[in-house]
Image: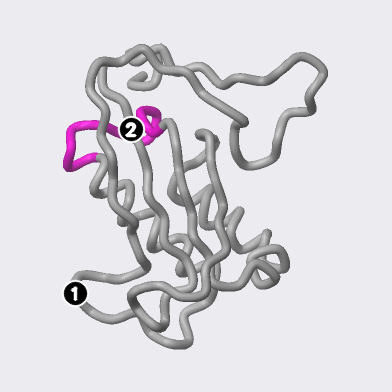
Amino acid sequence: MAGEDIGYRAILPDGWARPRGFSHAVSATGATTIRVSGQLAREGDAPIPPDLSLGEQWRRALANLVTVVRAAGADIPNIVLLRAYVTDMAEFNAGGAQVGEAWAATLGRHFPAMTLVGVTGLVDPNARVEIEAEAVLP
């Protein structure tokens, strides 16, 4: 498995409950770092449809991110960090099930370290989420 090749290990401080949907930190001993720019829910060069659900935006953005990671010669287990930017934190909190389904459909049970940031807008006016990543190769 690719994650084992890079010495991927989730970090959980003693006495802390395991977080849901991410890791507090991860360590990796690989030699090459891949930094993936923020990915939106676009399909090709088309703008994001204005009525696209939050869950579908997450699924498409994560799928685009995985496509870029694979193009760089890595795969899902090599992803050690995600940063997600959302335009509506209340919508994110209310849409947890949709986000979870999108996560499972694209990343499965891989939970890298993650930061979630609320922003006032993204480059595409219909975008509600943008996700960037770091991956490590052996």
User: Of 65 and 106, which appears nearest the observer?
Assistant: 65
Indicate the position of residue 93 as horizontal and vertical percent values.
70, 63
- Amino acid type at image mark 1: Asp
> Disc 2 designates what residue?
135
Instruction: Indicate the position of residue 32 as horizontal and vertical percent values.
Output: 23, 22
Say which residue label 1 marks: 45
Identified at 52% across, 57% down, the residue is 102
Label tally: 2
**Label 2 crowd (10 A; few <14 / some 14-19 / many >=20):** many
Residue at x 33%, y 21% (from the top left corner): 2
- The C terminus is located in which quarter? top left
At horizontal 58% and vertical 56% (from top left) the residue drawn is 101
- The residue lying toward the viewer, choosing from 114 and 99, is 114
- Place residue 89 in its image quadrant: bottom right
Q: Which residue is drawn at 35% across and 54% down?
A: 63
| Residue 70 versus residue 87 in the image, above or below | above
Stretch in magenta: 70-79
In the image, residue 36 lies at what x, y percent? 28, 45
Residue 53: x percent and y percent? 53, 76
Q: What residue type is labelled 2?
A: Ala
Q: Is residue 50 above or below residue 38?
A: below
CA gap between label 1 and label 2 equals: 24 Å
Q: In this view, does 132 lie above or below 81?
A: below
